[in-house]
């Protein structure tokens, strides 16, 4: 099958019902999306499909027709995406494992609501678990990305 | 004196483990200088000065930070210790974890386990601590745990940087024919201010490494620090915001195959029979392997991708053997309850005479309460995994682990190899919290690698497998009793705390031949209760080691995680009974320990303690001295139509010397979130011998919409230095429970609190 990932058409030979997460990680060696739970409960696997934040661990790869964007492609020509830069500036990550998913959810949020309130941030981000407790810094980084220069 | 001698004679459990381990690891004696492991495998043009510093002719400066990075920022702080003295910026260095080696032994992790309160010092106690520290070296214990990394490294890694700097300067002095005392080292170069000539470390490295190391090294005064004491950008941050391939689960090797495990969920139980025909017939499945080892009994699957391995594991039917403990939670808690009722136990604190105090106590002066906590899972975001390759008689393992020398020892013994034939690569960790100090995941990967025909195999556990096969924070039950004096302050405290011993459980798994040896009392059973800085004239605090085979282990802050809940909830009950303000009462009892009193004073001031609170809100306070850190926390809760909401948390943490203030604040918040997650809603329960919870939907930590506002101050009044990874956790649960009492009048003595109140 063919899959549009990070701007490229990729050829993939895996079962149709394999979750997109494993097609990316094991099939295409794209390691940005992380495996956390496999049941869409933690958000570590979040990718964008046509700009919409999607849990890749429960999305059969055979059903994906849109363009998939993973965190691996957010950085362009050595320049971090404004959300990544905000994460760096706020020093958000601790273990960092959930942050790929957090950042992809934040990118989707900001494309829909360029200047979200705390409540809107909480609503949009509550599907992404963090065991290190970086939540206050995630809020701060989203505000920074919203207000800051791109 | 007699008592300490007795403890020392019996040897302390952890000491016994380490000594036995030392014999097993068998490498180092204490007095022997340790070898520099970096000498093997130096590249062309590369020089090493000691186990912590490598400099290459192309000016690549590599600092080895030999502790596990599981989120606590340790790579950055350890690198800063070396960089400070080496006179380089963190922007100029590459930081690596480095190899498994006895050179990176952790002596602080052993001294922290000495059976005394942190503030108790005497010649014999300090000498016991230093003997315990030496055990770390004898046993070559390269461990990340017990919040000891910075304490252990503070002197030795600064020394390593200073030693390299002085050797570089000596080489420059020879090169420029000037006296070394005139030279200045800065930003990776040595400069002669007179001639203006400058040589980079890269230019000097090869010659400098041949120089005699200086005999006498003077470390910089604190006032001259450029990096330490100031917040540094984390060296791992860029990789972590770009989806970096840095975790164990991201390991990718040529010809790699993929695996998973399906172990008996009746933990410790055997496998009676299995049928893997359907699994073996699935496309992509390579092999089904029986696993029968000290860590568990069950099956491994090797496939050409992880998802197929998961599917195949689900398709195998198994008849499992029985668990070596009661089948359900009620039965398990019954065992703990019975042990508590039977009394006895080991007293780590026995001062005054409690029995005399209670013999004639009027009933209205007695406060009594019984508390309990459940088992807890670690639930790291990255599920357990490891990658191993067994080829030509040698094993190579890529493991996200907290103890590489132990991983080497365990994997060698599981594979029947000499330790010299085992190479351990320690990856970054998607959370540790104590879980990755265990060796089951490395052991299983080793066994699957042996069956993988020389190919590397990455063994990933499903979330369900991870949660149902954790080594849990022990469940515990504790009884507290106090006698109030005329002024209301407690004059006697009698406490008994019962839980299964962590150290015993760790020994059973990792040194099975020692599984039944008499090991002495386990400090973790009373840690956080026997060693708190309260002046109560008569105290008896006893730990009861419950014989229960549910596997238990180190969970962020270990014994403090439950015992601080018991102790500080009880202190709140004492204050209520005595009609004293809980802050005022603590300040009076802590008068002999200024670091404690100042932390409490600070958090009271920060949180506006004692001032009128908004309608429908209330605050609770708790304090815990753990791992040398003096931490007071106030939690504010609010009654809302959706339930109780945690609105604010204030914390004052005294760490003695604050090496990186922003990272310390982040760690305190992290510890509090971890503690509040557990206190509000987490518990592990058993049915039919198996853990009932399987994933985040039924073991759901705090989410962003539940996270309060945080206000943290870092203090430096204490005359000891502490680590910071765990100290935020212990006071969180009792401060919350005390706040809920203040809000509702309901005293909840059992966790999680969600069994009694609803949270928003």
Image (spheres, coloured by chain):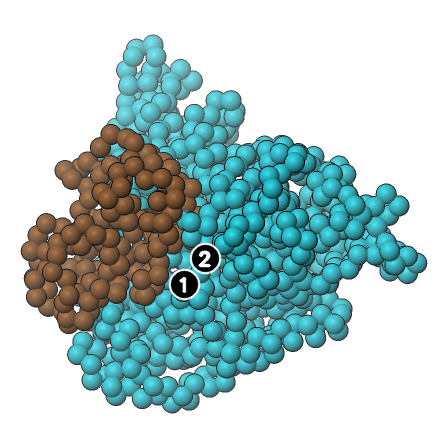
Frontmost residue, B176 versus B268: B268
Above or below residue B105? Residue B465 is: below
The secondary structure type at the circle numbered 2 is loop
Q: Position of residue B460 (x, y in %)?
A: 31, 66
* Image position of B490 (left or right of A129): right
Q: Residue sitting at 80 percent across and 48 percent down? A: B578
* Image position of B304 (left or right of A90): left
Q: Residue B701 bears which disc, if any? A: 2
* Image position of B209 (left or right of B718): left
Q: Position of residue A32 (x, y in %)?
A: 24, 52
Above or below residue A59? Residue B172 is: above
Frontmost residue, B60 versus B356: B356
The residue that label 1 is drawn on is B696
Pointers 1 and 2 in contact (C-beta within 8 Å): yes
The quarter holding residue B353 reads bottom right
The quarter holding residue B653 reads top right
Frontmost residue, B33 versus B723: B723
The answer to whether any part of residue B640 appears in the image is yes
């Amino acid at each position: 099958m063919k899959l549009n990932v990070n701007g490229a058409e990729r050829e993939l030979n895996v079962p149709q019902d394999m979750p997109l997460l494993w097609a990316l990680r094991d099939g295409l060696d794209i390691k940005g999306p992380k495996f956390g739970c496999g049941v869409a409960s933690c958000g570590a696997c979040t990718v964008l499909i046509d700009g919409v934040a999607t849990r890749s661990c429960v999305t059969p790869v055979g059903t994906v027709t849109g363009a998939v964007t993973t965190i691996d492609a957010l950085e362009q020509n050595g320049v971090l995406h404004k959300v990544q830069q905000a994460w760096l500036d706020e020093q958000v990550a601790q273990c960092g494992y959930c942050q790929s998913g957090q950042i992809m959810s934040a990118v989707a949020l900001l494309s829909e609501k360029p200047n979200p309130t705390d409540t809107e941030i909480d609503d949009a981000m509550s599907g992404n678990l963090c065991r290190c407790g970086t939540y206050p810094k995630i809020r701060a980084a989203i505000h920074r990305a919203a207000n800051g220069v791109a | 004196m007699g008592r300490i001698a007795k403890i020392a004679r019996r040897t302390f459990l952890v000491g016994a483990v380490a000594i036995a381990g030392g014999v097993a690891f068998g490498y180092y004696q204490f007095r022997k200088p340790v070898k520099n492991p970096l000498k093997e495998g130096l590249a062309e043009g590369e020089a090493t000065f000691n186990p912590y510093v490598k400099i290459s002719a192309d000016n690549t400066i590599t600092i080895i930070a030999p502790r596990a990075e599981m989120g606590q920022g340790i790579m950055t702080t350890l690198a800063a210790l070396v960089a400070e003295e080496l006179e380089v910026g963190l922007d100029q260095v590459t930081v690596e974890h480095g190899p498994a080696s006895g050179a990176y032994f952790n002596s602080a992790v052993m001294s922290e386990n000495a059976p005394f309160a942190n503030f108790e010092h005497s010649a014999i106690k300090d000498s016991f601590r230093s003997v315990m520290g030496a055990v770390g070296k004898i046993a070559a214990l390269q461990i990340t745990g017990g919040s000891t990394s910075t304490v252990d490294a503070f002197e030795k890694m600064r020394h390593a940087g200073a030693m390299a700097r002085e050797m570089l300067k000596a080489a420059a002095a020879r090169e420029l024919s000037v006296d070394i005392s005139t030279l200045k080292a800065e930003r990776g170069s040595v400069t002669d201010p007179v001639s203006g000539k400058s040589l980079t470390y890269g230019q000097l490295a090869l010659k400098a490494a041949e120089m005699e190391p200086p005999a006498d090294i003077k470390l910089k005064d604190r006032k001259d620090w450029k990096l330490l004491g100031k917040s540094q950008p984390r060296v791992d941050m860029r990789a972590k915001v770009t989806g970096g391939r840095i975790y164990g689960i991201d390991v990718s090797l040529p010809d790699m195959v993929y695996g998973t495990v399906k172990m008996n969920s009746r933990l410790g139980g055997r496998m009676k029979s299995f049928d893997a025909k359907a699994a073996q017939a699935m496309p992509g499945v390579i092999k089904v392997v029986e696993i029968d080892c000290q860590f568990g009994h069950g099956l491994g699957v090797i496939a050409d991708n992880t998802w197929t391995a998961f599917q195949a594991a689900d398709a195998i039917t198994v008849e499992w053997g029985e668990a070596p403990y009661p089948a359900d939670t009620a039965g398990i808690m019954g065992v703990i309850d019975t042990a508590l009722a039977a009394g006895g136990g080991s007293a780590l604190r026995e001062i005054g005479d409690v029995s005399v105090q209670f013999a004639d106590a009027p009933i209205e002066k007695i406060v009594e309460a019984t508390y309990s906590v459940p088992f807890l899972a670690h639930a790291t975001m990255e599920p357990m995994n490891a990658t191993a390759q067994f080829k030509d008689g040698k094993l190579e393992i890529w493991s996200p682990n907290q103890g590489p020398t132990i991983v080497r020892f365990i994997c060698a013994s599981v594979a029947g190899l000499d330790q010299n034939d085992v190479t351990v690569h320690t990856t970054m960790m998607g959370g540790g919290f104590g879980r990755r100090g265990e060796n089951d995941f490395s052991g299983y990967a080793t066994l699957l690698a042996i069956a993988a025909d020389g190919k590397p195999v990455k063994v990933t556990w499903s979330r369900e497998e991870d949660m149902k096969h954790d080594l849990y924070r022990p469940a515990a039950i504790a009884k507290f009793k106090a006698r109030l004096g005329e002024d209301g302050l407690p004059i006697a405290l009698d406490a008994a705390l019962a839980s299964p011993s962590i150290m015993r459980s760790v020994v059973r798994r990792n040194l099975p031949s020692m599984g039944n040896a008499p090991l002495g009392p386990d400090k973790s059973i009373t840690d956080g209760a026997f060693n708190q800085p309260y002046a109560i004239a008569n105290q008896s605090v006893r730990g009861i080691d419950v014989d229960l085979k549910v596997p238990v282990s180190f969970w962020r802050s270990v014994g403090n995680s439950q015992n601080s809940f018991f102790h500080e909830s009880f202190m709140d009950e004492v204050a209520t009974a005595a009609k004293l303000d809980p802050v005022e009462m603590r300040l009076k009892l802590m008068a002999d320990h200024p670091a404690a009193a100042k932390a409490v004073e600070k958090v009271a001031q920060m949180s506006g303690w004692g001032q009128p609170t908004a309608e429908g809100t209330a605050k609770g306070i708790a304090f815990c001295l753990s791992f040398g850190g003096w931490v007071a926390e106030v939690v504010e809760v609010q009654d809302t139509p959706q339930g109780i909401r945690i609105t604010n948390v204030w914390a004052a943490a005294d760490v003695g010397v604050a090496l990186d203030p922003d990272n310390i604040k982040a760690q305190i918040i992290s510890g509090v979130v971890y503690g509040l997650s557990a206190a509000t809603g987490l518990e592990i329960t058993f049915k039919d011998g198996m853990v009932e919870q399987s994933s985040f939907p039924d073991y759901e930590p705090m989410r962003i919409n539940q996270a309060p506002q945080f206000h943290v101050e870092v203090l430096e009044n204490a005359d000891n230095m502490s680590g910071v990874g765990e100290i935020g956790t212990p006071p969180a649960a009792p401060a919350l429970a005390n706040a809920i009492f203040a809000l509702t009048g309901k005293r909840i003595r059992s966790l999680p609190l969600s069994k009694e109140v609803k949270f928003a």
